[in-house]
Amino acid sequence: MEDRSGFEAWYRANHRRVLVALVAVAGGVELGREATDEAFTRAFERWDRVQVMGAPTGWVYTVGLNLLRRGHERRALERRCLQRLGTRDDAPPATLAVEVWDAVCSLPRREREATALRYLGGLTDQQVADAMGVAPGTVARLLHDARTRLADLLDPAPLDATHELEADR
Amino acid sequence: MIDLDDLLAPLADADLGDPLPVDQIRSRAESRAAGGRRRRLAIVGATAAFALVIGAALVVAERGRPTGVDAVDSATTLATEPEPAPVDDLVADLPVGRFPYDMLVEGGDLWVLNNTSRDVTRISIAEHRVVSTIAVQGGAPGGNANRLVATAGAVWVAGVSTPDGPGIARIDTATDVVTVVPTAFEPIAISARGGELWVGGQRTVGSGGDERLDATVQRIDVGNLEADEPIGLAVGRVPVDVALTDDGLWVLVQATGPSPLLRVDPATGEVTDRIDVDAAAVRLVATDDEVVVGADTSQLGGRTGAVTLVDPATRTVVATAPLDARPEAIVLVDDLIVTSGLRALDRRTLAERPLPARYSGLGFAMTGDGTSLWASVPGSPDGSAAVRRLSIDDVRAAVAEEAELGVPAGWQLIDYGELRFAVPATWEVPVTESCASGAPGVVLLPTRSTSTCSAVNPIPLPESVVWIVESDPQPGGVPAELGTLDATTFGSLACTTCRPTYHLPSGLQISVTGPEADAVLASFTRSGVDQALADGPLADRSGWRTVAFGGVSVEVPPGWPVVDLPGSDTITTTPDGTVTGMSGRTDPGGCGGDRFGETGYAYVGSSQVVSSCPATFVLPVHPGVGLWIRSFPDVGHAMVEARPYDGPSEVDLEVVSGPLNRSVREPVLDVAVDGPDGPVLVTIGARSDPATIRAILASIRVPG
């Protein structure tokens, strides 16, 4: 093996964010972990090239997204997310409300990826665009659409005033 | 609006377990590396032994590059041992007879009726091969094999000629044996349902001076092959198509004016309804819920066609839509009506759903089998033709993709390297480099800004034009969006009387003028190789040739000549070894040298012949078809950025970008693969079909 000094520090600094983001993209903790581990392993193998890249973490995100896209057919994934079979692979992280998890999983793939990378991975719009291979303007649109969709799913419809009064009686 | 930071904070803080220890990452990596080394050592050992034998024969030392070409024709193997058909493939071309006119799927086979060669090609869908070619001539000259239909155990052909007169041909699907059934008139149309078969054609009625032709239908019992008395419809025109449904027999009669669509009661032979549809109707598809009619208005001097949707319950026209294609064939796919062309329409509203340009021209004859759409490919001048298998899922995905891009219905899509954009279908000169043509809707593709196509050139441009030139990237500018692309402009976007020029990071400058400018500008997106890198179908590799270089093999489509670039070098020297002249093929992308062009070539290795650069003349750059495989050390590593390729490849590939030793910036895709002798670079011309590019990438191997 060639000299891979510097890998460990970089790995420890970035692992958590990558893992969280890919878990959200995958719709499952185990799937997200597998993709994360494989992406970092590939970075380790190519460390001489990866470490000199402008954004090594962006490279790892791209690899992780590609692994998830390749390994899991989109519709099956979304179906799995929504059905939440109760196995550990598909269960939401314990600290996350089930309805939030379901809502995130129900997002179209590209909106889910953009949301995860932007808000969980902590990437900028430009970095998300680079990782996803789309224009920054597209990322902005995807995030806007995701916010709108999540709001529809999670914000309870305001009660009609009459109903509130009746309920108070 | 919802705050995603707050919403997702619990997930960010969730307990997801400890990171994989670095030791385990190292262990996984070393384990994989050991497997790779074992394979590589075996290859290097064999190569070294081979090199010892032939080394003395080498006269010209290469610059550390592997040389030579391995070309293997895989067609023979494929012909004797056909592989099962990959259902998800977009493209699978199979040869058929001359002028495929109609086709259907029956008993797991595709049956293609070839009008000119008067035969039926039977293709095994499971095995992707031609099973048999069945002549359907009835024993006499003439006849016009028009339509196919299937019943239990048989496929029927309308339009054969026998010594006793016209008839239909019955092909036994178990034996391919043909039986001819005489009919009272020349059958042009045919339909079947249950145990009955209906044919339509014209029959002479009347006598003496009162003779005339009448549209006629006739029922034939499939069991005993007995025909009922012909039924005259009292319409002096040709019934071009019939369709039997639970609701009755629909008969489409062609006319130069409104074409009558007749509903006939099959029990009584009475015409119960007449609905006038478009002139020059040619095709009828009917289910119990809808009747779809295609019209070929080109017969009347027009360029296009039309589709009409009829409600069989109310027997009224629901909608009619013009079409920039001749709907000789119509297939219903879920919520789509797909016609020759290939054009897709919404099944309820007939709104056009644009499809990529790569589908254009297909499907004079078509059918579907639930997972695949089969479409005829335009024949070549020698009369040979083919049918192409398209994945229905991919057609659906392409429709959805185009819908997302917001391409106006009926517009034509133009792929240019990294760009895709749409222009109105009425633009008759879609691509030219000439500013002087004066035709409306000219698309000017990249030339250097020194060309006569500069913005200040006095040559008057047509009213509508897409103007694209290549120059050095322009720093600065106001950020702007060009379709889905990020661009900059130096003009004021608030200016309502001028058109800004958009600058892309690659250096392309784009401006659009004319009344459709806004819609054209909004349609710009990434294309070419970017499409190929996205998820998508693969071309079928049957008959492709394998080319090897530097321990890496790749398959190329049939018909791409292999050019051994080092092998083409001719070097003239003086007795003392001084080089006095060189000739041969130059590397693709050299100024004035070899380029990827209209016809695909597979270039192998790197030439020593250097083309003259910088060129002193304007050099137009076109996306081309072709492949170039060579060693990576020729590329300046420092100039190259790489990202992993996510696609159907058995080996790890990286998409690389940078100057890559090409003096002319051609739109291409470059991928790198680790070979036993070092990295190898595969360059693919961007004009190749995305499915073809994906198939090439999927074929890359490191043998051993």
Image (cartoon, coloured by chain):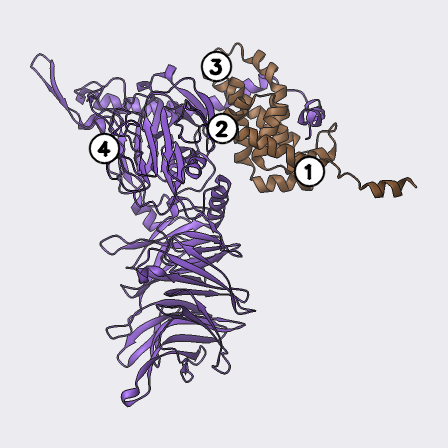
Chain colours: A brown, B purple
| Distance of label 3 from label 2 (alpha carbons) | 37 Å
Q: Using the rendered image of the protein, determine whether residue B173 is visible from the camera's viewpoint.
A: no
Label 1 amino acid? Asp
Closer mark to the observer between disc 3 and disc 1: 1
The residue beneath circle 4 is: B563
The residue beneath circle 2 is: A135
Q: Position of residue B144 (x, y in %)?
A: 30, 70
Query: Is disc 2 surrounded by few (<14), some (14 to 19) or many (20+) residues within 10 Å?
Result: many
| Distance of label 3 from label 1 (alpha carbons) | 51 Å
Label 3 amino acid? Met
Circles 3 and 2 in contact, beta carbons < 8 Å: no
In-front residue for pair A15/B282 = B282
Q: Secondary structure at mark 3?
A: loop
Q: Name the disc covering residue A1, or none.
A: 3
- Looking at the image, which residue is at 37% across and 38% down? B514
Q: Is residue B676 above or below residue B196?
A: above
Q: Position of residue B532 (x, y in %)?
A: 42, 36
